[in-house]
Image (cartoon, grey):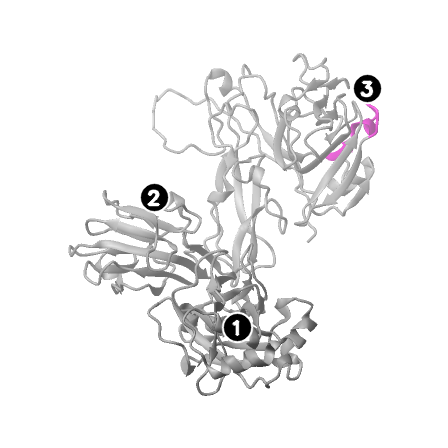
Amino acid sequence: MKRNPIRPLFAAALSAALLCMSAYAFTPETVETPSEPIVEDENAALTEVTSELLFYQDFDNIPVGTYESGDIASLLSGTEANKLVDFGKMGWGVIGSGCTFEVLEEEDGNHYLKVTGTTYKAFGVWFDNSDLKYAVMSFNYKFPASTGYKTLNSAAYSAQGAMFVGGTGDGKTGNWTANNALMASTATEWTQFRNHSYVQSPCVGFGFNQSAGEGEIYLDDITVWSFSTRIDDASEPAHKSAVAKTISFKNSNGYEDAEMPADITRYVWYNFYNGQSKPVTVDLSSFAPSSAPAGYEFAGWSATDGGLKIKDCQYNAYKVPGDFTFYALWQKAKPVVMQENFDDYEVGTVLTSNDLEFLQLNQFGSADFTATVVLDETTGSKVLKIAGSKIYSGFALKNRGRTAEKEYVTFDYRFDSADGSRLVIYSGTDHTGGNHQGTVSRQTAWTNLIFGSNPANNVFGFFFDRNDGNYVMYLDNIYYWYIPAGLEAEDKQVTVTFANSTGSPVTATMPEKLTKTLWESADDKNNTINLELIAPTDIAGGYRFAGWSRTDGGKVISVNYKAHRIIANETLYAVWEKVDAPALLDTVSIRTGGVQGMRFKASVHNAALTAENAEIGFIVTRAKFFDQLDNDESLFNFDDLGSVEKAMVSGISFKKADGVIEINKLMDEEDTSASIFAAVLTGIPESKENYTEKIYIRAYMKLDGVTYYGNVKNMSLYEAALAVKNTEGYETTDFVERILEICQ
């Protein structure tokens, strides 16, 4: 949006009058008239001090590009007065021309001025050769780098045309003088600087000094104002005279009306010492509209209508140059979410309210209250233990969005026991009985609470309200959020992203992002997701997917896993558990009774049996097929070798589908940590070739659709029979002897 620069504003002269003292009447005043100068002594009473704003430019209305001195002067003011120039262009012989001006743009759209020059080249704001001023110049500056660039000297002209920089005070002589305040800092971030001329001059500005490096500086938000008297000399009668000005707050064009703060009075800054002891700055962070256009929220103040927010370097202490107006900036309102899960704190850390963004701990000041980060014994997660020994231990919400339409808090909690004092929810003008909104049930298992409040209420919190004892509870995953009024449905959309944990030993394909609606209604089922139905695919690495965590490397979400509420844009991280694949035992035997064959055994950890979907068994192949795998055991699996017709057989010892056991051939064992299962290979045709060919066997298990393979063993039927024959206490069996007879 194109904006016009601020025109010079002229203050009316302030006069002091001698009063008739014949009546000697005296009436105390509590508030002085803003336009009256402060009378410190009889000399000051005879002095009139006036001030005017001469020049303001933030460059936002200046197109990006390079300009000559005269060209940019015309763009900046539209007149010959109060223009930004290369001083060498003004015909002063002591300064050569050579400064160039280029308007650049930052990522946020801010336009600023790049000034380039060489030694003793000067630039600044020119008033008029016939209109001399005691001027003050303020601007924001930064350099391209912290070293290798020329800094600046103050520059001004006397009435006689000689260049002046902090001269002798006679108004006629002076020399280049380094401005230590600026010389001391080649800042690379926007920094505020102010300087004033010591003499009545037609200009105020700066020149590049003769240090090494390029003469280059970035400038923005240039403001120049003047006073009717010299301002650097404390002996001047008017040194402490206060010139009051009005600071106004207005809405920017194009937005609906919003209630602006009332005008305030401040006093024009004009020296480095604030000798008048009056408020000369505006802390803009202390002022905000009391209402907002529908669907928008206040974003800060601009010095021009439709401009950008005033830079941080001056936002909290804006030096008053004269009558000035600040314009409200608005941005599309969006929900705001604050959360705390305590994972960033060491176990044993004692927290106070200063540690937390939105929680006020011990809001009623109980002397024995503590809030300690502990490791929860039931989940293994870091949680906050709140403890006290009397009523009114508790916590409240702070930094709330009090102008919002809706606000909520949710947290996971548990108590040590079902017996004890009630935890009361309060929301209203205060915490007293009429504002009690209910109680939190004393659940000993982790439970979730969600509660909404009216943002206009003064207080919102929780406390123990009775002398029943047991003022202890555990908190985790605390969220506070508010939803401004006037938001469209798309403004309340939030996205859940699924990611692998950092440093994970597993490769897997993560699920696609999900976009949902921010939780604000229990009736809206679109704002929850069943995390049990969402899992990575293409898992490889000897681990099984255990679930999703709110934090990278954290624990699986323990509450509302099947109905996870969408509260904010968040990333959920995959949690993995090491899988102990079934392992073949060293024992191999010959089954001589019934259907004869070679028996193998394997062991599996019982934790695998708890999966909702599980399958455990063996795969078997002959040497003629295994030799085709180039001795790569990893290829001995269902997908590779199993794809070759008649190359592999398998048998199932245990199977569970959707929690229901369909097959169970596990052997009864005293060991409660593992189970044994076995398989017999039968039907080997009788011949030396078949009996001496090695048989390869491998145990496997499938958990929730992912297959895990154990070790590979091999043995021929002849080798098995020979081992049985050589076993101490062997009793002769026909099947073993027949195998040995054929092969030997």
Q: What type is the residue that disc 2 sits on?
A: Val
Q: Residue at x 43, y 57 (%)?
A: 403
* Upstream in sequence: badge 2 or badge 1: 2
* Residue 657 screen position, x and y as percent: 45, 81
Circle 1 packing at 10 Å, graded few (<14), some (14-19), many (20+), is some
Q: Earlier in the sequence, mark 3 or mark 2?
A: 3
376, 203: nearer the viewer: 376
Residue 251 visible in the shown view: yes
Image spot of residue 596 (x, y percent)? 49, 84
Asked if residue 594 lies left or right of residue 89, the reply is left
Element type at mark 3:
loop
The alpha-carbon separation of the residues under discs 2 and 1 comes to 70 Å
261, above or below 191, in the image: below
Residue wearing tag 1: 722
Q: Secondary structure at mark 1?
A: helix
Image quadrant of residue 75? top right
| Number of residues whose C-alpha sits closer than 10 Å to that of mark 2, classed few (under 14), some (14–19) or many (20 or more) | some
Q: Position of residue 721 (x, y in %)?
A: 52, 75
Task: Tell us which disc is closer to us: 2 or 1.
Answer: 1
The one nearer the camera, 708 or 117, is 708
